[in-house]
Image: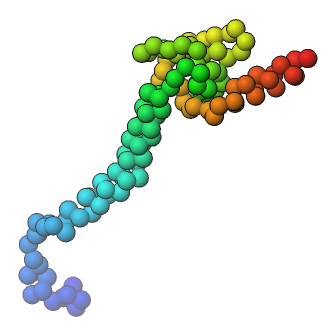
Amino acid sequence: MSFFISDAVAAAAPAAQTPGLEGMLFPVGVLAFFYFLFLRPQSKRAKEKKDMISAIVKGAEVVTSGGILGKVIDMDDNFVKIEICDNTFIQVQRQSIETMMPKGTYKAITKKVAVNKV
């Protein structure tokens, strides 16, 4: 074995060194990567949804998490009463509202449904 490595060099192997600042760079870099890739966008979306739910007013047109389009008729702290068709109402939790639609969307959709029924 002394043909490849001399005995003196093999015997003088350095002792294990403790990693310094360089050893911490990779784990810190991975944590920062996951923060900017996953955690920050998720918290941003949650904040936007919270702001949207607090901005709901009577007459707003919304879509629920189940995909139901309707107009807000009444609301309290936890529930929202939504008109989904003429004189047809449902109550959903505020948190189940996914998006607010532009004004006129509900009217246009109900008008299409009425025309198709005739």
Q: Residue at x 57, y 31 (%)?
A: 100
Query: What is the x, y in percent for residue 59?
Result: 59, 21
Q: Quadrant of the C terminus?
A: top right
- Colour mode of the rendering: rainbow
Of residue 14 and residue 19, the one placed in the foreground of this image is 19
Q: Say above or below: 10 vs 33.
A: below
Query: What is the x, y in percent for residue 31?
Result: 30, 54
Query: What is the x, y in percent for residue 89?
Result: 63, 10
Q: Say above or below: 104 vs 27.
A: above
Q: Quadrant of residue 110?
A: top right
Query: What is the x, y in percent for residue 84?
Result: 67, 17
Any part of residue 78 in sight: yes
Q: Residue at x 50, y 25 (%)?
A: 56
Any part of residue 96 in sight: no
Furthest-top residue in this view? 87
Q: Residue at x 64, y 21 (%)?
A: 70
Q: Quadrant of residue 98?
A: top right
Of residue 60 and residue 29, the one placed in the foreground of this image is 60
Position of 35 with respect to 63 (left or right) is left
Q: Residue at x 21, y 85 (%)?
A: 1
